[in-house]
Amino acid sequence: NKEVKFLKIINKQSNESIEINSQFIAFYPELDEVRAEKVRSDIYKHVAKKSDVYLRTSLDNIGLATTSILKSDLRGTASLLYYSLHKAVNGFMYHYFNRKLKIEDYKIDINEVEHFTSAIYYKLSKNNFEYKHELNSDNYVDILCDNKVKSVNPYSILYYISNGDLFQEINEGLFQYIRFLAKQLFELDLESEKTITELKKFKQVFMEDRGEGKPQKQIDEVKAAISDCLIRYYEGTENNELFLLFALSLRLYLLRQTADYDFDFEVETSTREMSLLMNIVKSFVKIGDSYVRDESRDIDMDLKKSINEGSDIADDYNNLGHVDELTKETYYHVDSNFEPLISNDINVTYFMTALHLDFYFSHQKSLETLNLMGTITNR
């Protein structure tokens, strides 16, 4: 088979063609703005993966957060870091659905990942974070979504998308931050033998007050959820490293919320905490993004190989024009004057090979002839 590096589809009845290669998709005749936008939207639905869009946004937020912390803008840093983490989890989720569950984006029947609230955490803790079923294309909505709008439980999806390699890479920075957080919130040293006992006392008092209907501050609800995370980590709960990531996510979401309205926000946190959060979120996003891109690159290489090794589809289309039965030569007739001047806003190289032009011919028909030949490419 002859090597093919482009695919051209021609509709001879309507005189339209589409050319697809590794660099662009070309349409003839040229699409108007309205139709071009509709086609672009349809292509993105199948080609531009949601995982890529979310991860690009996440990486952009990391860059903006770096600028904010250099300006000592702790409120802006907290917000950008949280949304970087949240967008990254969405990106990893869509990649997981595409690769592991074999579901294309347009078939995924869910909305975004919910936020890392303490309320959602407490709801899961009642079931002791038990995940008895593997996800598949039939049950993923029932397992991951708790409401009618089909928003994904953030803690549940982290359970399914996280892996040992990721935690091996971020473990040192993550534990360093958790050590800082325990000191900040509970005035506890994680290496102390009394740590678990003190955390259980704090949680017990909070749950008793909550059971009696006493009003609870948001910060205390989050602190109690974080204490539960640390207890589960130290007691060796299954996938216990995941609870350190839960604790970080709970804290970062609280900081993102209080950054909007808390007058004493700068007192509640510090440049030190933001720096630690920056380190771990940046590592989490970049390591995960690298993992996703490595897998996507393998897919792209396989696809490109299959295209280049495919049959010469373009040769299946007959050239348009009149074929002289005696010489078997193909002639293309055009019947109006060529435009006297060709001008473009961009640099374009015009070239024709062994093409005889009659004295009267149409510029538009020349372009049509070239675009409706299977062996001519828009390159």
Image (cartoon, rainbow, N blue to C red):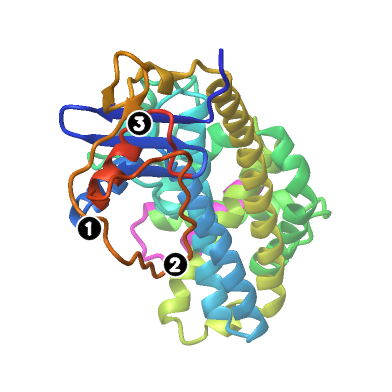
Q: Using residue 338 as the reference point, say whether residue 278 is left or right of it.
A: right
Foreground: 167 or 285?
285
Residue of label 3: 373
Q: CA distance from mark 2 to mark 1?
A: 19 Å
Residue 110 in view in this figure: no
Mark 1 or mark 3, which is nearer the start of the sequence? 1
Is 196 in the magenta?
no
Query: What segment carries the magenta color?
Result: 211-230
Q: Nearer the viewer, residue 65 or 134?
A: 65
The residue under the point 60% across, 24% down is: 305
Residue 176 lies left or right of residue 18; in this view the side is: right
- In the rendered image, is residue 18 in sight? yes
Instruction: Work out how far the residue at label 2 is from the one at label 3, CA to CA, in angstroms.
Output: 25 Å
The residue that disc 1 covers is: 33
Is 287 placed left or right of 101 in the picture? right
**Mark 2: amino acid:** Ile
Q: Which residue is mark 2?
A: 346
- Image vertical order of residue 222 relative to residue 161, above or below: below
Marker disc for residue 146: none
In this rendering, the answer to whether 242 lies above or below 247 is above
Q: Nearer the viewer, residue 374 or 321?
A: 321
Q: Position of residue 298 (x, y in %)?
A: 64, 30
Locate residue 323, reporting x and y percent. 29, 21
Characterize the magenta stretch by its predominant secondary structure.
Answer: helix
| Foreground tag (2 vs 1) | 2
- Dot 1, how many residues are within 10 Å of its Cα: few (below 14), some (14-19), or many (20+)? few
